[in-house]
Image (tube, rainbow, N blue to C red):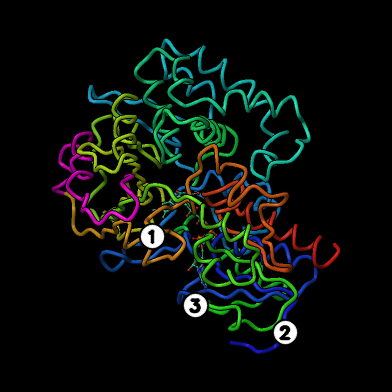
Amino acid sequence: MHKTDFDAIVVGSGPNGLAAAITLQQAGLSVLVLEAKPTIGGGLRSAELTLPGFVHDVCSAIHPLAISSPFFRTLPLADHGLTYIEPPLAAAHPFDDGTAAILTRSLAETARSLGADESAYLDLFRPLMDQWPRIDADVLGPLRFPSHPIDFARFGLNALPPSTWLARRFKTKQARGLWAGMAAHSIQPLSNVATSAMGLVLMLSAHVGGWPLPRGGSQQIANALASYFCSLGGQIETNCYVTSLAQLPSAKAVLFDVTPRQLLQIAGHRFSALYQWQLKRYRYGMGVFKIDWALDGPVPFTAERCHQAGTVHLGNTLEEIAASEQWAARGHHPEKPYVLLAQQSRFDDTRAPAGKHTAWAYCHIPNGSEVDMTEAIEKQVERFAPGFHDRILARHTMNPAQMEAYNPNYIGGDINGGIIDIGQLFTRPALRWSPYRTSARGLYLCSSSTPPGGGVHGMCGYHAARRALKDVFGR
Ligand SMILES: Cc1cc2nc3c(=O)[nH]c(=O)nc-3n(C[C@H](O)[C@H](O)[C@H](O)COP(=O)(O)OP(=O)(O)OC[C@H]3O[C@@H](n4cnc5c(N)ncnc54)[C@H](O)[C@@H]3O)c2cc1C
């Protein structure tokens, strides 16, 4: 490791670490990023996990939050090699009867596909879409007095109820199922308060910016962020696992793209007793079991619309999805898990050899579980795509424990850096004036364990860096 001094050090090169590093470097500071693994990117890596020529997204795959991120959209990432591909449909949600609900860029087309719920969908989303450009930065940031309080309050009225409650606006199986699949991205029982927030943000982002995938894999987002950072003069070192502050070169500020448990191990001795107590109480959520497949052909979905969608949600009705999430949250392994599937190679020919395909899927199971969900997930895919099994050339699986071994931020397989429930939505990791500041001067948390939480948007890193700039550098 370099022994030269830096203005700031960022530990971890996930999207939030890179966003923090760019924000600081843009302000004219000298910044060093230290990454534990041989490659940068955290949840943005892509790799040939199965067979040569098949490029899989190891973690994140679909990027509505990145393309519409108030910070990322200010960066010249296209000039640094990033190209987004937008599938014709953002998402499809097939049912046992062979039909599918769809989510597209067009509000009207999505609403029309929901039949008798067309007007209910428009009544909910039309006003929210109108308000979204005025409130997106507040929704994707720490709790503070919003710049448009009335719009923000209106959004909150819809976002705070449990998603099962908001589902009462819809009467068709199609609209209720589609909604449940979106809300289940919150990785908690759908009856929990504020699970509507995730569903609304994801559906709004489809209508506003689409649900794209990066050409060449999610790694390309990390590569473009890193390339831009280095073009500003920033430095990155890989293979540098930080376990103690004593390892670091001197710097005026250190920002950690890690979760509270790791932060306590690295810097706990510098924190007040109260802050240590707060971090110890931080809660992690369910884990994920993930599969990547190399396929001999595309996933043979019965419902035609599924072939045009980047993401396909497999869980049938709202009732089935709610039961699966509830069962997993109670510590069990669902027989028919709610499965989130992406089919990148359908739209990006760099992902697989000609004529072959990749698919990516995961389901939610108890934190830390080592149970193999391969059969249960593949049965769900087969249910909506008969003949799928026969197309599998190779598979790569990761259970929650393996997820954590792969990325130390995924504690017990929790991909959001801590559960995003009402107690930890805006006040992650603890109730404080600034969630990014620790109790030790110059040390900051910038990972998804701070607001606005999980997902590839970089807003946690951006806000943490802004805090450090004000506190330490008077900018
Ligand atoms: C299976 C899966 C699917 C997902 N799908 C999506 C999706 O489709 N769309 C989406 O928006 N989001 C998705 N996510 C979530 C998204 O990847 C994360 O929310 C996001 O990556 C969090 O960013 P981060 O910068 O906070 O942390 P991370 O991306 O986890 O990065 C943290 C980095 O810090 C490094 N690090 C940790 N500890 C140390 C240390 N002590 N020393 C040095 N380096 C350290 C790690 O190696 C890692 O590189 C998914 C995640 C998973 C696992």
Mark 2, secondary structure of its residue: loop
Quadrant of the rendered image containing residue 461: bottom right
Q: Amino acid at mark 1?
A: Val
Quadrant of the rendered image containing residue 322: top left
Mark 1, secondary structure of its residue: loop
In the rendering, which numbered label is found on residue 336?
none
Give the CA separation, mark 2 to mark 1: 34 Å
Label 1 C-beta lies within 8 Å of the nearest ligand 1 atom: yes
The span shown in magenta is: 363-390
Give the CA separation, mark 1 to mark 3: 20 Å
Residue 174 rendering spot, x and y as whole percentages: 36, 20
Query: Is residue 384 highlighted in magenta?
Result: yes
The C terminus lies in quadrant: bottom right
Residue 3 or 66: which is nearer the viewer?
3
Residue drawn at 50 percent across, 45 percent down: 212
Residue 315 rendering spot, x and y as whole percentages: 30, 32
Label 3 C-beta lies within 8 Å of the nearest ligand 1 atom: yes
